[in-house]
């Protein structure tokens, strides 16, 4: 009874850098081919062959909203048209004057008026829409108007939002920080193996994600009326995450010449 033949072992060897793409093949029994060893690289080929390190980098950045909008509403219903107008305009003038004194620019204030006949009376409504860039100033002004005008005006809850430019800046910042992290990673790898990091050969952003706030939609809708200003700001904060893939050139460290 003959013994079983031991399975053949094959070892594949590949040397890097691979400067010569055309490799010779040796024909084996059964029609299979086995890559042969490449010819040794010449000194010129060795110098021109590019060695590379491939790394990925990630980053997550966030930005609080840079704008807030508040709407102040007032109305009056009188039998005489002049009385209805006078009542609303008196409060309206007081509000616009307060905003000017507090340094709110006119381009950030929009005033709309509506006057109509309602049965046997005249009804006038006015609305002041104010855009703030300083949230502390916004709170001070709203508190002041509530104190002075009481229930004769209705002040909405602030609506926080981002301008398109700030969102685009956030996306760019996430990508730049991700590339920086990839560069640091590649730098540490080269230092570890005694090499010098060269110039970047390829930079590719593979993924960009962004999301708003840290309060889920169900909880946000349930608590929207009871959220504090700081909670509203946190809910409107935008987060952006970027993932990049970068290829760097790797250079050997130059040997220091010995002085005779």
Image (cartoon, grey):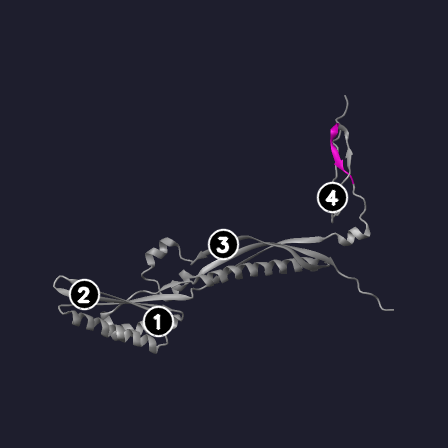
Q: Which dot, 2 or 3, sits closer to the camera?
A: 2
At which x and y percent is residue 13? 75, 42
Q: Which dot, 4 or 1, sits closer to the camera?
A: 4
Q: Nearer the viewer, residue 223 or 172?
A: 172
Give the magenta-colored segment's residue range. Answer: 30-36
Q: Which dot, 2 or 4, sits closer to the camera?
A: 2
Dot 3: within a 10 Å radius of its alpha carbon, few (fewer than 14), some, or many (20 or more) residues? few
Residue at horizontal 72%, vertical 53%? 50
Residue at horizontal 50%, vertical 62%? 169
**Relative vertical location of residue 10 with respect to residue 107 in this rendering, above or below:** above
- Disc 2 is placed on an element classified as strand
Task: Report which quarter residue 216 is drawn in.
Answer: bottom left
Q: Which dot, 3 or 4, sits closer to the camera?
A: 4
Dot 2: within a 10 Å radius of its alpha carbon, few (fewer than 14), some, or many (20 or more) residues? many
Residue under circle 2? 123
Residue under circle 3? 209
């Amino acid at each position: 009874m003959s013994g079983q033949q031991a399975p053949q072992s094959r070892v594949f060897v590949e040397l890097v850098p691979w400067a010569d793409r055309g490799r010779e093949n040796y024909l084996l029994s059964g029609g299979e081919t086995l890559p042969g060893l490449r010819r040794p690289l010449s000194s010129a080929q060795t110098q021109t062959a590019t060695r590379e390190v491939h790394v990925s980098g990630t980053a997550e950045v966030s930005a609080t909203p840079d704008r807030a909008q508040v709407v102040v509403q007032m109305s009056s219903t009188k039998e005489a048209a002049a009385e209805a107008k006078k009542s609303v305009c008196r409060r309206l003038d007081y509000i616009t004057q307060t905003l000017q004194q507090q340094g709110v620019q006119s381009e950030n204030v929009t005033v709309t008026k509506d006057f109509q006949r309602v049965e046997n009376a005249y009804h006038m409504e006015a609305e002041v829409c104010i855009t703030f860039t300083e949230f502390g100033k916004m709170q001070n002004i709203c508190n002041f108007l509530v104190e002075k005008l009481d229930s004769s005006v209705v002040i909405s809850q602030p609506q926080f939002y981002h301008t398109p430019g700030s969102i685009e800046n956030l996306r760019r910042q996430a990508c730049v920080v991700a590339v920086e992290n990839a560069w640091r990673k590649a730098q540490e790898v080269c230092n570890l193996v005694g090499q010098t990091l060269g110039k970047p050969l390829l930079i590719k952003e593979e993924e960009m994600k962004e999301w708003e706030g840290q309060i889920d939609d169900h909880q946000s809708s349930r608590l929207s009326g009871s959220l504090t200003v700081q909670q509203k700001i946190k809910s409107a904060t935008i987060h952006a995450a970027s993932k990049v893939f970068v290829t760097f050139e790797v250079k050997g460290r130059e040997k220091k010449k010995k002085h005779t």
